[in-house]
Structure formats: C-alpha cells, structure tokens
Amino acid sequence: DIQMTQSPSSLSASVGDRVTITCRASQGISNYLAWYQQKPGKVPKLLIYAASTLQSGVPSRFSGSGSETDFTLTISSLQPEDVATYYCQKYSNAPFTFGPGTKVDVK
Amino acid sequence: EVHLVQSGTEVKKPGESLKISCKASGYSFTSYWLGWVRQMPGKGLEWMGFIYPDDSDTRYSPSFQGQVTISADKSNRTAYLQWSSLKASDTAMYYCARHKEWEYVYDAFEIWGQGTMVTVSS
C-alpha cells in the first residue's frame, strides 16, 4: 500500500505568516490528493481536491500544489481561525490513506 | 441541502456486537460512494472503506478487512458500519463521509456526518 507522510507534525506561526505543509506519497499518485482541515472537536472539512483545486467556500488564502509524490498546502496569511490539524489524503487507489496530520497553532 | 446524519453515542462491552448508521438526505443516495473514517482519541484520521449503495460494491482498507462490515440499505437511504465482537481498541469516533462527485470512485470526501462516538469498556 502507498504510505503518506506529512511534515512538519506541528508548527506555530504568527498571524499573517505564510505557512507551508508538505505531504509525500511513497509512490506516484498523479494529482489524486486532497487536503482537509479539522478544527478541535469538529468534523473534518474538505479544503482542496485534485491537489490544487479549492473547494467551494474555502478562503483563497489556502492553496495546494504538487503532483505524483510531493504536495504542499500553503496558507498565504495565517489567521486565528486557521488553528486546526491538517490532513492530506490520497485517493488514487484503495486504501485512500490519510497522512498523519499537521497541527497548526497561532503564536 | 445535503446531509449525513449519524446515529448517537454508543457505550458497549467487549465482545458485544454493534451497528451504527449514517442516514443520507438531499441527494441521490445510490449514486455516490460513501465511506467510513475512524478517529481514535487524540489520533489522526483512518480510512476504513467505502460502499457504492446502488450495487453494494464495497472496498475495505486491509487494516479493517474482516474486522468490520460496511453495508447500505437503499430503501432507507442509510449506510451502516457494524462489528460482530467489539474490542476496547475499537473505542473511537467514527465518521461517515460522501464522495464529492456523482459515481466517481477515485474521489475526496466532500460531505461528512457529525460522527458517532463508540466507547468499548468493561
């Protein structure tokens, strides 16, 4: 099975900072990659699919890029409401494995 | 409006059986893949498997194959996740979630249920 890793596992940044999270697949997955945001105690929310397509209603400060094995989620200007854990998920073939998550805090 | 409404909190003993549900509304239930995701306390998301309700085509993660059963009832627009013999390690929040695109198997989860907390303790 294809394994998904994320880095860093956690980060703390200031409001307005640019934040980048990396997701890596152990084999190529084309662009079958999604990003989710899970705020504390809440249900996960789809942010980006097909590696770089912003889900409807998601603020434009979120963006995704990458293909095959290396992907990034960028928050261009971190806001207090972005405190959450972010997960990547591959869906090129079953199992549709999630990454281990990156916890984002605001300093 | 599209909704997935899950059944309520469960507290069970090891060895007991359990079936939790996910009722869909606001869309064509038979035309979208619907999956289940586990989240153990303080841990990350784990993809368990999914089902296409129209023909009950079901795929499981190897980690969950043989441990749970995913099913769907078209007449009730409801998907299910069941265990025949619970273990303490099954204690977790379980989410159902629907794929984004109609009929598309290789897809992200766009719509999520509110989660069902299952606690297994003697």
Image (spheres, rainbow, N blue to C red):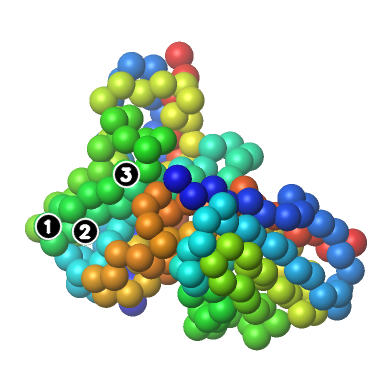
Alpha carbon distance from label 1 to label 2: 6 Å
Specify the label residue B52 is tagged with: 2
Q: Quadrant of the N terminus of chain B?
A: bottom left
Q: Does B84 sit above or below residue A80? A: above
Q: Amino acid at mark 1?
A: Asp
Residue B102 relative to residue B12: left or right: left
Q: Does A6 sit above or below residue B30? A: above
Q: Residue at x 61, y 73 (%)?
A: A66
Mark 1 or mark 3, which is nearer the start of the sequence?
Answer: 1
Mark 3 or mark 2, which is nearer the start of the sequence?
Answer: 2
- Circle 2 crowding by C-alpha within 10 Å: few under 14, some 14–19, many from 20: many
Chain of residue at mark 2: B
Report the label total.
3
Residue B31 position, x and y percent, is 20, 69
* Residue matched to label 1: B55
Q: Residue at x 48, y 69 (%)?
A: A30
Q: Residue at x 63, y 65 (%)?
A: A70
Chain of residue at mark 3: B
* Residue matched to label 3: B60
Q: Amino acid at mark 3?
A: Tyr
> Do dots 3 and 1 share one subunit?
yes
Alpha carbon distance from label 2 to label 3: 12 Å
Q: Does A47 sit above or below residue A54? A: above
